[in-house]
């Protein structure tokens, strides 16, 4: 199950992150999950939003550089070793995880990890084989 994610390339300067988030907020787009990674000059803000196409359009209209790509969202048991089981399935399939970020469901029973593997289809096959629960876009956006 693939989920669309948008990545926004931000100059590493005061207020730029705020501008991006206010742009999305004015468009009435709620953020389900986010991650930001930075270097000395640029940052990449990764977002899971219910309408990634709309978010991309709104951001590009406001002069942001945006890219859509596919990621995998999996449920992780909230117990020691829960995330390691997911990573073990991918490692056993010989797959590298490029990045990941997580959040806890509102009910607090499970964590959700968003990840990108070097080969997303192979990642999905490996997770299915290990019986790891993946979330589709509709499920993820409802959390």
Image (cartoon, grey):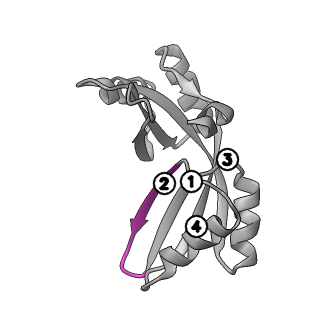
Element at badge 4?
A: strand
Of circles 4 and 3, the one toward us is 3
Residue 39 magenta: yes
Dot 1 or dot 4: first in sequence order is 4
Q: Residues within 10 Å of mark 3 (few under 14, many from 20)?
A: some
Asked if residue 1 is positioned above or below residue 4 in the image, the reply reads above
Question: Which residue is under mark 3?
Answer: 50
Residue placed at 47% from the left, 83% from the top? Answer: 15
Q: Does residue 109 appear left or right of residue 5 in this picture?
A: left
Of circles 2 and 4, the one toward us is 2
Q: CA distance from mark 1 to mark 2?
A: 7 Å
Q: Does residue 58 appear left or right of residue 114 in this picture?
A: right
**Image spot of residue 107 (x, y percent):** 43, 29
Q: CA distance from mark 4 to mark 3?
A: 16 Å
Most common SS among magenta residues: strand
Element at badge 2?
A: strand
Of circles 1 and 2, the one toward us is 1
* C-beta proximity under 8 Å, tags 1 and 2: yes
Question: Which residue is under mark 4?
Answer: 8
Q: Residues within 10 Å of mark 1 (few under 14, many from 20)?
A: some
**Image spot of residue 105 (x, y percent):** 45, 34
Q: CA distance from mark 3 to mark 1?
A: 8 Å
Residue placed at 32% from the left, 26% from the top? Answer: 78
């Amino acid at each position: 199950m693939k989920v669309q994610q948008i990545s926004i390339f931000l100059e590493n300067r005061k207020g730029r992150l705020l501008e991006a988030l206010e742009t999305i907020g004015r468009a009435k787009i709620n953020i389900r999950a986010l991650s930001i990674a930075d270097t000395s000059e640029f940052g990449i803000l990764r977002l899971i939003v219910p309408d990634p196409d709309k978010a991309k359009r709104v951001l590009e209209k406001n002069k942001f550089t945006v890219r859509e790509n596919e990621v995998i969202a999996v449920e992780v048991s909230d117990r020691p070793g829960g995330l390691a089981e997911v990573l073990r399935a991918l490692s056993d399939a010989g797959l590298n995880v490029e990045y990941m970020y997580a959040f806890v469901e509102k009910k607090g029973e499970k964590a959700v990890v968003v990840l990108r593997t070097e080969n997303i289809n192979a990642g999905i096959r490996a997770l299915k084989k290990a019986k790891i629960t993946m979330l589709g876009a509709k499920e993820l956006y409802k959390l």
